[in-house]
Image (spheres, rainbow, N blue to C red):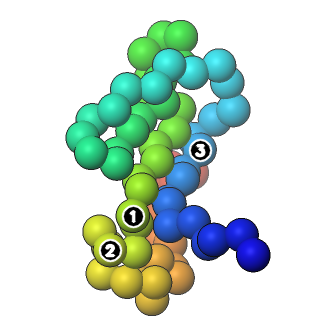
Amino acid sequence: MIPEGDALSITFRATTVTTKELGKGIAVDFDAEGNPAGIEVLDACARFGGREALREVILEGVGH
């Protein structure tokens, strides 16, 4: 049996990236111009208040 992972990964755009760790278990991917291309948070359930807190994602200001 494969253990279930507990990570939140958000990709803004698929590109070649350089990853910078911002803190323990938090990393941001940057594109060649230095713009954020993605973010990963390990132990996401514990950080955000449990599995239920991660069931809904609201994107504000998208398409404006």
Seen in the picture, residue 22 relative to 31 is either above or below; the reply is: below
Corner quadrant of residue 35: top left
Lateral position of residue 26 relative to residue 36, left or right: left
Considering the image in quadrants, where does the N terminus appear?
bottom right
Q: In the rendered image, which residue does mark 3 sit on? A: 11
State the SS at label 2. helix
Q: In the rendered image, which residue does mark 2 sit on? A: 46
Q: In the rendered image, which residue does mark 1 sit on? A: 43
Disc on the earlier residue, 3 or 1: 3
Q: Residues within 10 Å of mark 2 (few under 14, many from 20)?
A: few
Name, please, the residue furthest toward the front: 1
Q: Where is residue 41 shown, x and y percent of the image?
A: 41, 53
Query: Mark 3 is on which residue type?
Result: Thr
Query: Mark 1 is on which residue type?
Result: Asp
State the SS at label 3. strand
At 45% across and 88% down in the image, what residue appears? 52
Are discs 3 and 2 less than 8 Å apart at CB? Answer: no
Q: Camera-side residue: 56 or 19?
A: 19
Are discs 1 and 2 less than 8 Å apart at CB? Answer: yes
Q: Camera-side residue: 4 or 21?
A: 4
Alpha-carbon distance for marks 3 and 2?
Answer: 21 Å
Seen in the picture, residue 64 relative to 51 is either above or below; the reply is: above
Query: Mark 2 is on which residue type?
Result: Ala
Alpha-carbon distance for marks 1 and 2?
Answer: 6 Å
Q: Depth-wise, is mark 3 or mark 2 nearer the camera?
A: 2
Q: Where is residue 16 shown, x and y percent of the image?
A: 65, 19
